Image: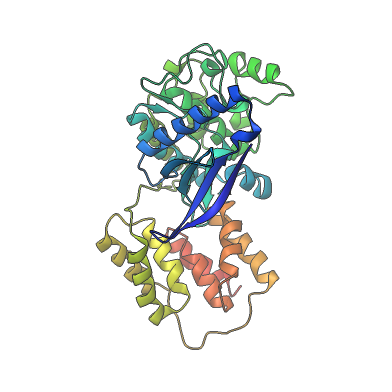
């Protein structure tokens, strides 16, 4: 009954996604409900201006069919990544969930509870950024779209209070986020079942299988954070998305004393600004310019910081170019080796980055350097670059 198109907005020259409902395929009773849901999604997401939330540009009706004009996101949802790459490393899982919590913190601050946090609604871009989407069943303050007493959401990711059809608040989203984090780390849902009844019973009555037993070697603090998020009583969970994010930071620090910094919300740079910097940079480093600019843009908090990050990377071994580069093609064997090496630092996200980068690199050296720009720590980047010649 619905379809999403990739489209081009000629007025402002940008790609968009068009989400359209075929009302002619719905009964008259369903038409009114879906139209209201659609308008609700537009109002909820439209209030949330945040780098980790898919932006809503417009709501309109075409030939009787309502549609949303949305930000076009070139990436895969977490369900797809799990299916193709398997479970995430702790560092990669925390990086993803940290951004999800940033998005939820913004929504919660505006009185919006998402109510359908699940892997399919979390989009992962090639550069590691995360976008949360689909606010169609979210609860807004003063909203009458969904009332207490009606169970609504995706069963495997609902909180106990959702399952009972009770009033929910931000802590319900944190429970759902805890389920997603559990699945990223273990590859399994904590409350699996063969039927809605079985899943609901486990969500309401049973504790999740011990994550520390399922995944030996995880920091005890990380296991504790996940289980706290999955507490049956809302009062026993984290009080806010920010508090949960802070607990994950602490658990990351306990993992062999390695600090994993959750990505913070970067400044929003216009496409024109980034394209101008990329053109100027391409005169020096060639096709590598695009990777350098995109990687720096997701970290910089200002235009000045953006230039500083790029300059620093140009001076590092991971970004230096020479005129003696080999122009040999990037072979399938090299792609497999790159994926294996990069996974050590980034987890399952590596597969997406390697595939995208291999399509543009003109030599093994350029290919390896472009991948290195996605590695945060300088010692890790050097180690990754050295692996090219091993």
| 44, 128: nearer the viewer | 44
For this orientation, the residue located farthest to the right is 194
Position in image of residue 70 (x %, y %): 46, 46
Q: Is residue 160 above or below residue 16?
A: above
Residue at (46% x, 65% y) in the render: 373
Residue at the extreme left of the image, as rendered: 304
| Vertical relation: 363 (above or below) 242 | below
Q: Number of labelled discs?
A: 0
The image quadrant where one finds the C terminus is bottom right
Q: How is the image coloured?
A: rainbow
The image shows residue 13 at horizontal and vertical percentages of 41, 61
- Answer yes or no: is residue 224 visible: no
The answer to whether residue 330 is seen in the rendering is yes
The image shows residue 265 at horizontal and vertical percentages of 35, 47
Residue occupying the point 44% across, 63% down: 379
What residue sits 43% from the left and 77% below the top? 320
Residue located 61% across and 63% down the image: 355
Please state if 370 lies on the left or on the right of 250 as rendered: right
Farthest-out residue, bottom: 324
């Amino acid at each position: 009954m619905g379809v999403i198109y990739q489209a081009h907005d000629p007025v402002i020259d940008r790609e968009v996604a068009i989400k359209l409902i075929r009302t002619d395929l719905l009964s008259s009773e369903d038409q009114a409900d879906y139209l209201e849901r659609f308008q609700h999604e537009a109002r909820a997401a439209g209030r949330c201006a945040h780098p980790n939330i898919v932006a809503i540009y417009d709501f309109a009706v075409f030939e009787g069919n309502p549609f949303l004009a949305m930000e076009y996101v070139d990436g895969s949802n977490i369900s797809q990544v799990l299916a193709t790459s398997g479970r995430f490393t702790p560092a990669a899982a925390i990086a993803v969930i940290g951004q999800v919590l940033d998005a939820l913190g913004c929504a919660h601050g505006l009185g919006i509870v998402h109510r359908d946090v699940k892997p399919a609604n979390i989009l992962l871009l090639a550069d590691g950024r995360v976008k949360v989407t689909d606010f169609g069943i979210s609860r807004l303050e003063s909203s009458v779209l969904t009332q207490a007493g009606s169970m609504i959401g995706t069963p495997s990711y609902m909180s106990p209070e959702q399952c009972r059809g009770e009033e929910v608040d931000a802590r319900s989203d944190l429970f759902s986020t805890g389920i997603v984090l559990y699945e990223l780390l273990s590859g399994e849902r904590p409350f699996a079942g063969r039927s809605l009844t079985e899943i609901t019973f486990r969500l309401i009555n049973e504790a999740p299988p011990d994550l520390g037993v399922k995944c030996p070697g995880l920091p005890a603090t990380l296991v504790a954070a996940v289980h706290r998020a999955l507490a049956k009583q809302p009062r026993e969970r984290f009080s806010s998305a920010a508090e949960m994010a802070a607990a994950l930071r602490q658990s990351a620090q306990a993992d062999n004393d390695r600090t994993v910094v959750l990505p913070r919300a970067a400044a929003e740079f216009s496409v024109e600004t980034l394209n101008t910097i990329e053109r100027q940079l391409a005169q020096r480093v060639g096709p590598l310019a695009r990777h350098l600019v995109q990687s720096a843009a997701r970290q910089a908090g200002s235009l000045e910081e953006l230039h500083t990050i790029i300059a620093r990377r140009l001076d590092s071994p991971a970004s230096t170019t020479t005129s003696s580069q080999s122009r040999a093609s990037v072979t399938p064997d090299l792609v497999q080796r790159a994926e294996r090496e990069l996974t050590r630092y980034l987890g399952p996200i590596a597969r997406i980055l390697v595939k995208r980068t291999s399509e543009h690199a003109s030599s093994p050296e350029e290919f390896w350097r472009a991948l290195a720009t996605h590695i945060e720590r300088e010692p890790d980047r050097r180690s990754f670059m050295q692996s090219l010649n091993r």
